Amino acid sequence: MTTDDAPAPPRRRGGRAWALALLLVVLTVAGGLSAVRFVLSPPSATPTVVEFEVLPGWGGARVAAALAEAGLIRSALAFELLLRFTHLDRKLGEGLYDLSPAMTSREVAAALAAGGRPRTVRIVVPEGWRAAAVVARLAANGLGATPELEALVRSPGSLAPPGLPAGDSLEGYLFPATYDLPVHSTASQALGAMVARFEEEVTPAVAVALVDSGLGVHDWVTLASMVQAEAASEAEMPVIAGVFLNRLDLGMPLQSDPTVAYGLGKALPELSAPAGDLRRDTPWNTYTRSGLPAGPIGNPGAEALLAVLTPQRENPEGVPYLYFLHGSDGGTPVFRPNTDLPAHNRDVERFLRGGR
């Protein structure tokens, strides 16, 4: 057989098949990548802010399901896999997050890993409230059970602020303010926030003023609680503080009705002199006992605390104030401080009994 008669070499069909297979793989991968990009892309172009909460104990699967339900991601499964692949599932923190459906899944995951803010409940403590009222408000908002709160107020232990005598309660030290407390706060944490706020009032300047006044922290708070309970306005507070301080200096009984009411467990309007309440002795009765009551009768605010340190003790002629009253002159409220008993009695007759 001659060379010209040799058969042609067989065609290589494998190369074409390999190329087609490679093309198919590339197209499949490209399609898969496109699909991945799609499921991780923002579900909406609208940059609406949505408050999203991660509750205690939630894992990646639960978070992903909740995000999908809220319309913040396209695919719960894809998001859960993203968390696992990036190890962010170990960094999810409970709390509130401001998210948007215009965010990618990667952006959502990064936001969740950065940590959220706690959900809070707003607690408003007005000036002068007794600890019992504070306890009731905290319990009503789920920040501890009433028995636990009462026990902590009565025996504060590590919650006790500096200056609180051993065995005394937190009455007077639950500072009146507006508190935004995490909803999962314990009774100790809620009360601790109020005590910490009180401690902010004891500035270096206040510490110096206390030394100058000769008052300890507890006496200061006790007097301020009386001023808070007696005053109808902040303008009256320095004068009322001056009256009490002058009477203490002279050894006169303070004769403050709110202290009697506190000792009897009554609200001030329930107090009855004709029924003998003023003669019923308790450690807080400033008619039957001399000096300060056994402790604060409420929780004083900043103005009452300041008034005790900056009292107005004298009238314009330099005579010490020793008496005051709240009355009415033709329906108009009247506050009358006096320096002597005859003048005070005249004001009692005129503004309390309607005499002229």
Image: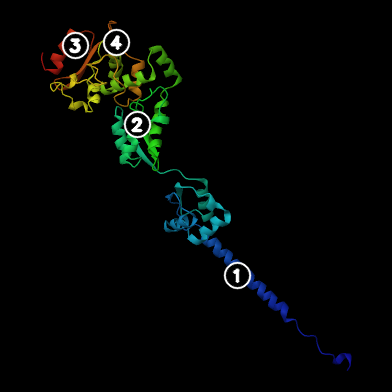
Query: Can you tell which quarter of the image residue 313 is in?
Result: top left
Residue visible at 72% across and 81% down in the picture: 13
Mark 3–mark 4 Cα distance, whole angstroms, equals: 16 Å
The residue tagged 2 is: 153
Comparing labels 4 and 1, the label whose residue is closer to the camera: 4
Image x and y of residue 71, in percent: 43, 57
Residue 307 is situated, as x and y percent measured from the top left of the image, at 33, 18
The answer to whether 49 is drawn above or below residue 206 in the figure is below
> Does the residue at mark 2 contact the one at mark 4 (Cβ under 8 Å)?
no
The amino acid beneath tag 2 is Val
| Residue type of the residue flagged with mark 3 | His
Mark 2 or mark 1, whichever is nearer to me = 2
Q: Mark 4 points at which residue?
A: 246
Quadrant where the N terminus is found in the figure: bottom right
Residue, disc 1:
28
- Packing grade of label 2 (10 A; few <14, some 14-19, many >=20) is many
* Marks 4 and 1, how far apart at CA: 93 Å
Residue 107 point in image, percent of width and height: 52, 52
Element at badge 3? helix
**Picture layout, residue 267 above or below residue 25:** above
Residue 335 on image: x %, y %: 22, 17
Of the image marks 2 and 3, the number of the one nearer the N terminus:
2
Left or right: 179 as drawn, with respect to 297: right
Mark closer to the chain start, 2 or 1: 1
Q: Distance between the residues labelled 2 and 1?
A: 69 Å
For this orientation, the residue located farthest to the left is 355
Closer to the observer: label 2 or label 3? 2
Residue 343 vs residue 217, the one in the foreground = 217
Q: Name the residue under label 3.
A: 344
Mark in front: 3 vs 4 = 4
Q: Is mark 1 on a helix, strand or loop?
A: helix
